Image: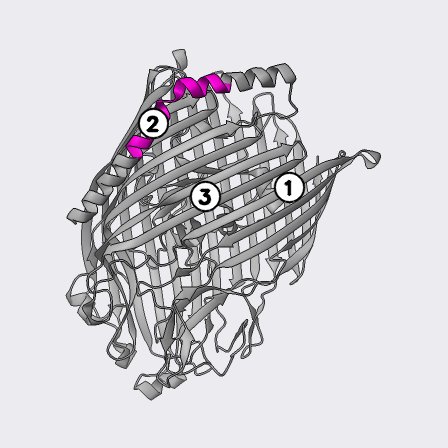
Amino acid sequence: MAKKHLSAQTGLFRLSILFSLLAANWSAAGATDTLADAELTEQGSEFNYEVITVTSQRRAQDLSEVPIALSSFSADNIQQTGIQQLREISDFIPNMEFSRGTDFGSQVTIRGVGANSRNVGFDTRVGVYLDGVYLGQSPALNQALYDLERVEVLRGPQGTLFGKNTVAGAVNMISARPIDFFEGKASVMIGNMNAREVQGRVNIPLSADSAVKVSANRSTRDGYIDNLTTGSKLNERDSTAFRVQFLSELSNDLELYMSVDGLRSHRLSFLGEALTDPFGTALNTEAPEKFQVATTTDTYEERDLFGAHLELSYQFGEGYAVKSISAYRDSDSEYRNDSDYSTLDIFSIVYADHYRQWSQEFQFISPEHEQFNYIVGLYLYRQDADSVRDGINGPVSAMFGNQPGSVVTNFGEVKTTSYALFANSAYQLSDRMNLAVGLRFTDETKEVDWLLDGRASGIFGIGFTEVPLNQKRSDQDLSYSVSLNAQLSSHINSYLKYSTAFKSGGYNLDYVTNADLEASLEFDKERVGSIELGLKGAFLQHRLIANFALFRANFSDYQVNQLMELPNGGTSFSIRNASEVTSQGMELEITYRPISSLQIQASLGLLDATFDDFPNALAGNMNAAGNQLPDAPKRNASLSGQYVTELNRWNTDLLLRADITHKGSYYTTVTNQRTHTLLDGTTVAYGYIEENTMLNVRAGLLTHSGWEAYLWARNLTNSSKAIHSSRDFFGTITANYQEPRTFGLELVYNF
């Protein structure tokens, strides 16, 4: 631990020296930049610098002035990259990953750190928000992307801005709010795999001060994974989403905003293709090819999401304001899977989780453009989570002494009550430097009422609680951030920031053993402290916009949700505060316009996320210190080129675009193994994912009368590399592969 502390101090010292050296060059840099501005004014330029406005700090700010490693993915980027779901945005964001399996178990990872809420007693590490309202746990995360102004991805701890469970970062989807004139958009997309997407919005002004907007999205697509037993095709898409918004200026000082949104998705889903037999003893012979399974039950999931949002903003004299944000979210999900991944029909699962949450936030906001500005507030949150999870013994379970048709039951509820007091402020030390400080005190209580009845599990040893588990736990935490922001020139900003956050503790309400029950299902909160150095600037007469960040984060009492092997060959899910973790690396984002018709965007993330200490994590009670965190690629990158030119003869613009995304290799288990040897001596790939590069292309005609037509293709080279590797309850080794090539035609009409 002493070495770790010394290393953190050394890193801080080096970053501080670098920051000081940069700040020492203000005068020279400022003079150079002034000359560049003079040249730009004198010679003229066809390049207009687009100021990207973000609200990550609860104020509208220029992205270049925000002391956060932040990516802003605009509505135009969403449209022209052709992405349809939130999970797909991670291809373009440095050091961000979003799982590609089930929506029920969605996992967002930033800078190598993430988690899915596998059970109702365990939270995620990246908060996902819609207009600043927390969406909740894993089933609610993968949203349809439509009628958004932008998506903001904040990397690094966001404890003072967004509160608990943002130790790795936060994702905020910002709706495009109603405006004061009539307009709309309609689009239709058709593609291979019988893909269909219909999307539309209409904005209607009701008066000079009020407007309403209605938007909707309907997306379907056939699956591409053949279930040889049932004849079904898995991993299809079938979702409907809507949003209704109302905005009204009730007076010169008072604004009202209301919205309701919903998403319904029911589809044949997919968890993984079995590479082995159910018990991991020999290779799978029932469905040996890629994109094949042979299970008696189709993997299925259903999600019903609903939200309501009420916001009141009141402007006082002299620029002061208060804001109230009231919200309700409801997430209802069902999931089923064949846990033996075979035709044997040994065991299947049926899960049903229901989350209901209420939140209320009050903000008091000081005037902008003052020497000292601040936001103080109060946040109240309540979540009721109910879970019913049944494991059903199939006919073949009799070979293990189990009663066919008998049920292993895991059910209960967790009630979470939380409040937070927060303040974020900035003080202008000079014309070119300001100091920002953030504080957030959080008090959270979780009450659990849970029962596990594993008596029907037989030799697999799932535990049994004779009476329901009734427990209550509380966490208190003070998160803080301090940043020094320096303007090195009129177009170059820098910051040095230290921030903290915490992930609340909870309960391992899973299929655990009696030994787990006799120990403790409770785990404590984890904490993180992170230092970050950033540079954001415009160069070459604003042709080049660059954002750069160096970071190092140290996690203590890191919560690990690990699949543990049991002596009988089965597994158990264990959550414990078992390790110390360091995540460090670099991120770079560039937008370059060499000529007015060509825009090039690039991103690069380099990452080293490792366990510093993890006792008894490996066979023989060995320490996993030095091993990489699961699902943490050492690098990811993207390169996009978009060319738009006017075809004067047809009063139309031609758009050509190509996106290359690259993900480096990574491990999927704590053990960092690459293969697994089966009982028959066969070696199978397990736990290691090789690097993967994808190419997406798009060509379009955009008429000046509002019509647009596009041809597009994703994964043009038809890469089929593995993108995930896992081991399930019985020991089955599974793999997920890159989605095959998709292509299609899209028609858009703007009115």
The stretch in magenta equals 15-33
Q: Residue at x 32, y 83 (%)?
A: 403
Q: Measure the alpha-carbon separation of dots 1 and 3.
A: 36 Å
Do residues under tags 2 and 1 come within 8 Å of each other at their CB atoms? no
Tell me, for residue 456, which label it has, or none. Answer: none
Closer to us: mark 1 or mark 3? 1
Q: Measure the alpha-carbon separation of dots 2 and 1.
A: 37 Å
Closer to us: mark 2 or mark 3? 2
Which of 472/17 is in front? Answer: 17
At which x and y percent is residue 206?
61, 27
In the figure, is residue 1 to the left or right of 644? left
In the figure, is residue 191 to the left or right of 400? right
Amino acid type at mark 1: Gln
Closer to us: mark 2 or mark 1? 2
Which of 671/224 is in front? Answer: 671
Residue 551 location, quadrant: top left
Q: What is the residue that sits farthest to the right in this orientation?
A: 649
Q: Residues within 10 Å of mark 1 (few under 14, many from 20)?
A: many
Q: Secondary structure at mark 3?
A: strand
Amino acid type at mark 2: Leu
Disc nearer the start of the sequence (1/3): 3
When the figure is inspected, residue 58 is found, relative to residue 8, above or below; the finding is above
Q: Which residue matches tag 2?
A: 21
Q: Secondary structure at mark 1?
A: strand
196 within the magenta span: no
Q: Measure the alpha-carbon separation of dots 2 and 3.
A: 49 Å
At which x and y percent is residue 370?
37, 15
Q: Which residue matches tag 3?
A: 307
Examine the residues drawn in magenta and state their main secondary structure.
helix
At which x and y percent is residue 376?
31, 26
Amino acid type at mark 3: Gly
Tell me, for residue 642, which label it has, or none. Answer: 1
